[in-house]
């Protein structure tokens, strides 16, 4: 009888231990995962089954060419420091909406944190230099938890400032020189770095600050990043220059091409445009955004606006574009061609970097 009681007690103790261990395992299990990655892109963070969004989400709501090129360009800068092979991307968690709104405003007695100067005379105001700020966080995963390993901050600087001398009056524009834009950007960068280091979580992690030249409001393309700095301390340590340029093709005149390479790229695109317009005359427009890095063409985004109504027309046209693109467009660079009407996307033709094969996808209907 005593032996039976002893066995029961031992079994009960073992069962309790198993429950405790199971409970501990459940509490210590990670509550995050990642989106997965591909084609050299970062994995993103999913927490509690939901994508972890930025603390400042919604502050940059206008999806114009400046905003799109700012976000994609900032990610390209990040890849120079934090490789997608070793780091996981997380939306910014340390700068919230109210903080960025105060930083982007003018400095005043009520807003001492403003990065832009006080207005001064309304008839001749000081420019607002800092237009936008974005934070990106980079993490590592040890299997049990995520750890912050670095922060990247993009700072958009205006290349011109638009203002009115009186309400409902005409608009005026002040051009901001490249030298002044760089000077103001570097002043803002040091202030931002100092403020970030005051946050406990950011005292010792590398902080990269990248400066972006905003394109004018009426530009057909976005701006570009022109410098970045990786900092391990409280002072901006130095700047690495970036040479990016974006232009619209075809040029209105061949004389607008800045060098022979630009002229050749423009001619090639003009031939491509002519071929598809001759084959299918019902086109509203064919334009391209071409990006150059260190003077070399590095990618193209092409938009073809159609007036097609028949699905068979769209299918035939897409197939023809893929053939014409391979024949006339530059090789070795990533290219995407969006085929769309005024109201909807119809198809896409694309090629990845290093590939010589164009793929197609037609947005059909059931």
Image (cartoon, rainbow, N blue to C red):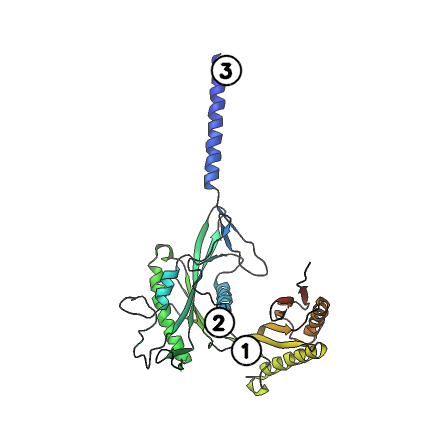
Residue designated by label 2 = 66
- How many numbered discs? 3
What residue lies at 45% left-to-right and 39% top-to-bottom? 27
Name the secondary structure under disc 1.
Answer: strand
What residue lies at 51% left-to-right and 66% top-to-bottom? 72
Name the secondary structure under disc 3.
Answer: helix
Check disc 1: other Cα within 10 Å, few if <14, some if 14-19, many if 20+.
some
Where residue 6 appears, as percent x and y from the top left, is 47, 17
Where residue 18 appears, as percent x and y from the top left, is 49, 30
Q: Are marks 3 and 1 in contact (CB under 8 Å)?
A: no
Where residue 102 appears, as percent x and y from the top left, is 34, 65
In the displayed image of the protein, which residue is found farthest to the bottom? Answer: 255
Answer left or right for 1 relative to 317. Answer: left
Residue designated by label 1 = 247
Answer left or right for 83 relative to 133. Answer: right
From this viewpoint, is residue 95 visible? no
Comparing labels 3 and 2, the label whose residue is closer to the camera: 2
Residue designated by label 3 = 4
In the displayed image of the protein, which residue is found farthest to the front? Answer: 168
What residue lies at 37% left-to-right and 75% top-to-bottom? 183
């Amino acid at each position: 009888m005593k032996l039976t009681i002893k066995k029961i007690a031992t079994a009960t103790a073992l069962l309790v231990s198993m429950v405790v261990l199971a409970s501990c395992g459940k509490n210590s299990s990670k509550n995050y995962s990642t989106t997965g990655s591909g084609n050299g892109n970062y994995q993103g963070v999913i927490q509690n089954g939901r994508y972890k969004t930025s603390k400042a989400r919604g502050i940059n709501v206008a999806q114009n060419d400046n905003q799109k090129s700012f976000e994609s360009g900032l990610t390209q800068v990040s890849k120079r420091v934090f490789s997608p092979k070793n780091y996981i991307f997380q939306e910014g968690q340390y700068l919230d909406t109210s903080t960025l709104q105060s930083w982007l405003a003018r400095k005043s007695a009520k807003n001492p944190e403003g990065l832009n100067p006080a207005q001064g005379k309304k008839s001749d105001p000081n420019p607002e230099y800092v237009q936008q700020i974005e934070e990106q966080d980079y993490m590592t995963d040890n299997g049990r938890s995520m750890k912050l390993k670095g922060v990247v901050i993009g700072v958009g600087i205006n290349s011109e400032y638009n203002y009115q001398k009186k309400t409902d009056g005409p608009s005026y524009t002040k051009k901001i020189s490249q030298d002044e834009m760089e000077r103001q950007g570097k002043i803002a960068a040091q202030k931002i770095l100092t403020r970030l280091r005051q946050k406990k979580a950011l005292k010792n992690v590398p902080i990269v600050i990248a400066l972006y030249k905003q394109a004018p409001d009426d530009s057909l393309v976005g701006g570009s990043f022109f410098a970045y700095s990786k900092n391990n301390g409280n002072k901006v340590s130095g700047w690495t220059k970036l040479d990016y340029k974006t232009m619209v093709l075809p040029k209105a005149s061949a004389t607008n091409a800045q060098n022979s390479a630009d002229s050749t790229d423009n001619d090639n695109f003009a031939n491509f445009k002519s071929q598809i317009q001759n084959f299918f005359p019902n086109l509203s427009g064919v334009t391209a955004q071409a990006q150059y890095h260190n003077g070399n063409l590095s990618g193209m985004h092409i938009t073809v606006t159609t007036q097609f109504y028949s699905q068979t027309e769209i299918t035939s046209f897409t197939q023809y574009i893929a053939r014409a693109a391979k024949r006339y467009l530059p090789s070795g660079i990533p290219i995407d061609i969006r085929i769309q009407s005024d109201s909807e996307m119809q198809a896409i033709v694309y090629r990845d970097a290093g590939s010589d094969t164009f793929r197609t996808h037609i947005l059909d209907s059931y």
